Image: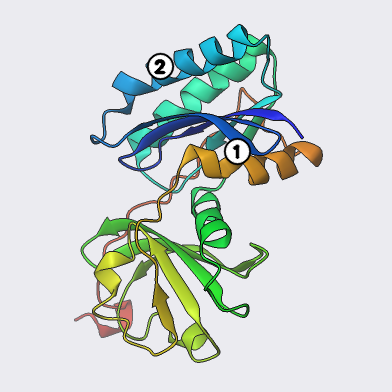
Amino acid sequence: MSLILSIETSTNICSVAVTRDGECVLEKVDRSGPNHAEHLGTFVDDAFTYMEQRDLKPDCVAVSSGPGSYTGLRIGVSMAKGIAYGSDIPLISVPTLQLQAVAPLLYHEEIPEDALFCSMIDARRMEVYAEIYDRSLKVVRQTQPDIVDAETYKEFLDKGPVCFFGGGSAKCKDVINHPNAIFLDNIEPMARYMAPLAEMRLRKNLTEDVAYFVPFYLKDFVAGKPKKMRN
């Protein structure tokens, strides 16, 4: 196991965590809005103070890689790159939607064994960024922007239970009324959830090039009529 410094800034929440042997030993969180530049540096300083007082050095720095807020991701990734370079440690990127899916697996034992996990981030109106996983966090459907209506996830719901969670799920409750739909509240992408995913990537040497790594900016989309329907 490893000592991992994790940074999450993909949404309005800014969080930093230090995990040791899979246990979160320090966590800093700000929920006041998209002002990560104001808080992230202080949180990182607090994390390094904690480690230095115990004569510890992180084995890697992990950062949420998106999708999410363009500005938030840039702030988080820039900080992580600086730490990786300055401390001469590996940079690990963790997909935002996947790390968000760690919480239901850890804390919701009531979820059926055959359930799929639909991790969502709010976009705008009835739009979300979403990716679907099985219980082992294997991708069942890749990340894509969805305009949510009753039919959007029907092909998966018709086969079995699907858990919807994350910032984009609350506004979907009224339109996804399938009996196999399960909604989980208060699930957010947080730095403390990165540990198992970052640990796995570190063991497999799945590190990023500090100079060239960029987050996954999933571009905004605008709903419109298909071309064949336009006048």
In the displayed structure, would residue 66 be above or below residue 224?
Answer: above
Which class describes the residues within 10 Å of circle 1: few (<14), some (14-19), or many (20+)?
many
Q: Nearer the viewer, residue 75 or 103?
A: 103
Residue 185 visible in the snapshot: yes
Secondary structure beneath label 2: helix
Secondary structure beneath label 1: strand
| Outermost residue toward the right in this view | 204
Q: Residue at label 1?
A: 93
Residue type beneath disc 1: Ser
In the displayed structure, would residue 222 be above or below residue 115?
Answer: above
211 sits to left or right of 45: right
- What residue lies at 49% left-to-right and 53% top-to-bottom? 100
Classify residue 159 by image quadrant.
bottom right
Q: Residue at label 2?
A: 41
x and y percent of residue 228 in the render?
Answer: 31, 83
Query: Looking at the rendered structure, which numbered label has been put on residue 35?
Result: none
74 sits to left or right of 202: left
- What residue lies at 48% left-to-right and 21% top-to-bottom? 79
Give the CA distance from mark 2 to mark 1.
19 Å
